[in-house]
Image (spheres, rainbow, N blue to C red):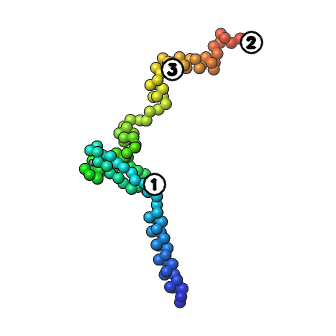
Amino acid sequence: MGERVLRGSRLGTTSYETDRNTDLAPRREVIFDCPEGHETRMPMALDAEVPASWECRTCGAPAVQRDVEAPAAKVGKQARTHWDMLLERRSIDDLEDVLNERLAELHPAPKSRKSA
Ligand SMILES: [Zn+2]
């Protein structure tokens, strides 16, 4: 007889604890800047995937997440590779010279090698 009362109160306690855990999920504020200079702040869960752009709350224009590369540069243009950066510092001719130098070190020319 007393068992039924016990079961009922346990159910209530369990659901209450679940609600509390949800509220305690870590959050952070993500700021989006629209082209008009408006600022849109959105609280996001720490582990949530933050979209690169968000509709501006003030004017509705696509706002870009602050402190992040512009989405156009991310999607339209590929990230610079090591090769791209290398080409900014050296010409192909320079690289040919460096390559030949390295090849000569690794594989000495036959004339400098003594034939046995
Ligand atoms: Zn705006």
Which of the 4 image quadrants contains residue 73? Answer: top left
Packing grade of label 2 (10 A; few <14, some 14-19, many >=20) is: few
Badge 2 marks a residue whose secondary structure is: loop
For residue 78, above or below residue 98: below
Q: Is residue 62 left or right of residue 108?
A: left
Badge 1 marks a residue whose secondary structure is: loop
| Cβ atoms under marks 3 and 1 closer than 8 Å | no
Q: Position of residue 8 (x, y in %)?
A: 49, 81
Q: Residue furthest right?
A: 116
Q: Position of residue 26 (x, y in %)?
A: 46, 58
Q: Which residue is mark 3?
A: 95
Mark 3: C-beta under 8 Å from nearest atom of ligand 1: no
Q: Amino acid at mark 2?
A: Ala
Q: Is residue 95 visible?
A: yes
Front-most of 69 and 28?
A: 28
Label number found at residue 46: 1
Q: CA distance from mark 3 to mark 1?
A: 45 Å
Q: Residue at x 46, y 60 (%)?
A: 25
Front-most of 25 and 114?
A: 25
Q: Is residue 107 left or right of residue 19?
A: right
Front-most of 49 and 44?
A: 44
Q: Which residue is mark 2?
A: 116
Q: Amino acid at mark 1?
A: Leu
Q: Residue furthest left?
A: 59
For residue 115, above or below residue 63: above
